[in-house]
Image: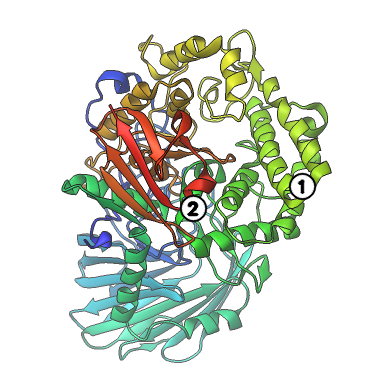
């Protein structure tokens, strides 16, 4: 099986028309628009470059949607109209305020460029093509680690290609920025260079043309006769010299670059081999979601706008989504980018004195102010427990600085934050870091951090068994955050009146009881806020209800739908792969508890799946029985107590057999 043939880049691009939910799913309460906010542009796994058609649509620059945070989703245009092809894009995000779409390349005939109607869009991992109507231009896009490739076929003479280096963002305020200090140099008939400041980051661009034409003094490339033009675009944020060196590494022709991209995608997608299923739709759903978990973050190689000569991974947009699902998957399967992520956060701590939650192509690292705390600590713990190589002593020093920041003194000195969810973030993060400190030999630090971790209790109202209601909650309320997996789940369950009381609260939250009351209700995988909460049932042995919820989500939420390109498929903002990563883990029948050495065991969707682990070992997950709730499991022949497995044991490789009822 060719894995890349199963993955559809159009997955989640547009508005999804979900099937009418029934049963438990009918009571779930969506807060976001039903669109994944992804794009079909050409990218590599964790690649620096992306190149995609530009409409100005929200939030990637592709599509027909206006800015949206819920229903109904406003339309920017009734039918797709392209204005060129832009570089660098988010994937699945909501309102982060910075939207890239730099260096728009516009092919035209005789200078016409009012927006073109697309005809016959196609896309596969690493490749995109479309024919533009009026004029008839066939456009193809691909990428390599060194640049983005444009191939334009003009059926008549008079073809032109222009590059707009001033574009920054989407269709209008408040989503557009301002380009500053633009400098364009025509080096020769075939090479154009530009330097421009975008979001306080200085970019250097190198554009090289091949096709028998020539650049004019205004930087527009002209071809006299019909034919094909190849344009490569390389960019950097360290220096023009570095960008030129990168441009020199571009593949010599488009087809070579495309073939190399396909090889990379086949290897990346093939890290998980779904076996024993002939259902084409289910394979396509799985690998399309896996594809969208591998777009972000982006590995820029040895340097970016904050430093040179060391790994630089960017576009953690946003960490409070991907730390739960996507990043544990990356650390489990992909060694190179995992090591670079750890090194990047080590360096971020050294340069910034903190570990940001939203690190993108801007000098503003305060975007995470209200969403969460210590998500980076959870992420780094997950990397460490999975054996990602790094200078962990240095990373611990950066973590320690981050925890004891002046703006975190409310927790470190008083044990409670103004936002209740931040109290839980800090407490759980401190416990994770205490384990790391203890292992590294920092026993005094570990003792203090273990003490701080005990403040998790301050987040709860002992009268209700839920989080304190009188707090400010991000994209939800105290119900949505009350069921996150904690280290001290036995105590937490006791607060709710024991297993029976905890189950009653869960039943109310998921709609098993009081389905008409949505004042505190599961968001139905429409948002990241509570996407891990179904697994709370695992702590009281109610895997039957866990399975019912996940199968309802599979049946009514993660479906093909009627998106703007005929393939919707993601029931809410995918936020750099956060929801897709959740879907992948749910299909595998394993769920990572971030910041803990713990994998919860559920019911796999497929009878047999093989994972190529980052350390070269293999993990086989085999389901013994039908698609029903798990009743027991064995890890390499040894029973898994309480249907649990440690992440460190998982990384040793072997076979997990899950017996279902």
Q: Tell me the tag on residue 652.
A: 2
167, 492: nearer the viewer: 492
**Side of 195 relative to 81 (left or right):** right
Rendered-image quadrant of the N terminus: bottom left
Q: Where's residue 377, x and y in %?
A: 65, 45
Q: Tell me the tag on residue 62.
A: none
Residue found at the far front of this picture: 637
**Side of 424 relative to 519 (left or right):** right
239, 162: nearer the viewer: 239
Q: Using a 10 Å C-alpha cutoff, classify the residue at mark 1 as few (fewer than 14 neighbours), some (14 to 19) or many (20 or more).
A: many
Q: Which residue is mark 1?
A: 400
Label 2 sits on a secondary structure element that is loop
Rendered-image quadrant of the C terminus: top left
Q: Is residue 84 visible?
A: no
Compared to residue 96, the image places residue 294 above or below, namely below
Q: Is residue 476 visible?
A: yes
622, 296: nearer the viewer: 622
Q: Using a 10 Å C-alpha cutoff, classify the residue at mark 2 as few (fewer than 14 neighbours), some (14 to 19) or many (20 or more).
A: some
Which label's residue is closer to the chain start, 1 or 2? 1
- For image coordinates 34% across by 37% down, the residue present is 658
Label 1 sits on a secondary structure element that is helix
Compared to residue 253, the image places residue 634 above or below, namely above
- For image coordinates 46% across by 76% down, the residue present is 146
Q: Where's residue 257, x and y in %?
A: 34, 77
186, 569: nearer the viewer: 569
Q: Where's residue 407, x and y in %?
A: 77, 38
Residues at marks 1 and 2, CA–CA distance in whole angstroms:
29 Å
Image quadrant in which you'd find residue 152: bottom left
Image quadrant in which you'd find residue 200: bottom right
The colouring scheme, among rainbow, by chain, secondary structure or one colour, is rainbow
């Amino acid at each position: 099986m060719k894995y890349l043939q199963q993955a559809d880049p159009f997955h989640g691009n547009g508005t999804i028309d979900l099937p009418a939910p029934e049963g438990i799913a009918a009571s779930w309460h969506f807060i976001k628009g039903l669109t994944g906010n992804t794009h079909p542009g050409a990218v590599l796994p964790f690649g620096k470059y992306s190149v995609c058609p530009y409409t100005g649509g929200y939030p990637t620059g592709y599509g027909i949607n206006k800015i949206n945070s819920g229903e109904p989703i406003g339309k920017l245009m009734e039918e797709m109209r392209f204005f060129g092809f832009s570089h660098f894009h988010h994937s699945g995000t909501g309102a982060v305020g910075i939207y890239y779409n730099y260096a728009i390349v516009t092919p035209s005939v005789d200078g016409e460029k009012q927006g073109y109607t697309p005809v016959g869009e196609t896309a596969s991992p690493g490749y995109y093509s479309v024919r533009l109507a009026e004029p008839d231009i066939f456009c193809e896009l691909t990428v390599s680690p060194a640049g983005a490739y444009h191939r334009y076929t003009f059926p008549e003479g008079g073809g032109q290609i222009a590059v707009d280096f001033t574009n920054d963002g989407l269709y209008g305020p408040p989503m557009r920025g301002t380009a500053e200090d633009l400098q364009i140099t025509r080096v020769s008939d075939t090479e154009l260079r530009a330097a421009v400041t975008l979001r306080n980051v200085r970019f250097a661009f190198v554009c090289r043309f091949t096709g028998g034409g020539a650049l004019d003094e205004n930087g527009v490339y002209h071809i006299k006769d019909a034919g094909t033009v190849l344009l490569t675009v390389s960019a950097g944020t360290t220096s023009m010299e570095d960008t030129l060196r990168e441009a020199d590494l571009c593949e010599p022709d488009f087809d070579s670059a495309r073939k190399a991209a396909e090889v990379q995608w086949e290897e990346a997608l093939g890290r998980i081999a779904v076996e024993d299923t002939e259902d084409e739709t289910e394979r396509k759903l799985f690998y399309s979601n896996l594809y969208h978990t591998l777009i972000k973050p982006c590995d820029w190689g040895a340097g970016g706008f904050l430093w040179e000569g060391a790994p630089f991974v960017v576009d953690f947009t946003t960490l409070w989504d991907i730390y739960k699902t996507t990043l544990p998957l990356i650390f489990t399967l992909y060694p190179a980018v995992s090591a670079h992520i750890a090194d990047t956060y080590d360096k971020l701590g050294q340069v910034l004195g903190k570990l940001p939650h939203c690190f993108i192509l801007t000098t503003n690292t305060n975007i995470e102010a209200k969403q969460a705390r210590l998500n980076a600590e959870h992420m780094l713990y997950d990397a460490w427990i999975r054996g990602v190589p790094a200078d962990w002593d240095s990373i611990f020093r950066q973590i320690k600085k981050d925890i004891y920041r002046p703006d975190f003194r409310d927790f470190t000195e008083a044990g409670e934050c103004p936002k209740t969810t931040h109290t839980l973030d800090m407490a759980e993060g401190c416990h994770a870091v205490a384990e790391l400190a203890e292992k590294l030999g920092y026993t005094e630090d570990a003792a203090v951090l273990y003490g701080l971790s005990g403040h998790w209790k301050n987040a709860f109202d002992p009268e209700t068994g839920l989080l304190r209601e009188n707090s400010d909650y991000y994209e939800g309320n105290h119900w949505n955050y009350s069921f996150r997996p904690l280290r001290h789940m036995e105590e937490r369950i006791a607060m709710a009146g024991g297993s029976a009381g905890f189950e009653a609260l869960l039943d109310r939250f998921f709609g098993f009881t009081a389905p008409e009351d949505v004042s505190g209700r599961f968001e139905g995988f429409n948002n990241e806020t509570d996407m891990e909460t179904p697994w709370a049932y695992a702590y009281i042995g109610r895997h039957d209800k866990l399975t019912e919820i996940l199968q309802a989500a599979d049946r009514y939420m993660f479906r093909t739908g009627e998106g703007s390109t005929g393939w919707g498929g993601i029931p809410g903002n995918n936020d750099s792969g956060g929801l897709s990563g959740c879907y992948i883990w749910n299909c595998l029948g394993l769920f990572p508890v971030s910041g803990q050495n713990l994998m919860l065991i559920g019911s796999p969707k497929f009878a047999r799946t093989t994972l190529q682990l980052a350390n070269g070992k293999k993990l086989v997950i085999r389901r013994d029985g039908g698609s029903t709730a798990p009743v027991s499991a064995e890890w390499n022949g040894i029973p898994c107590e309480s249907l649990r497995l440690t992440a460190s044991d998982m990384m040793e490789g072997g076979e997990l057999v899950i017996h279902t009822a």
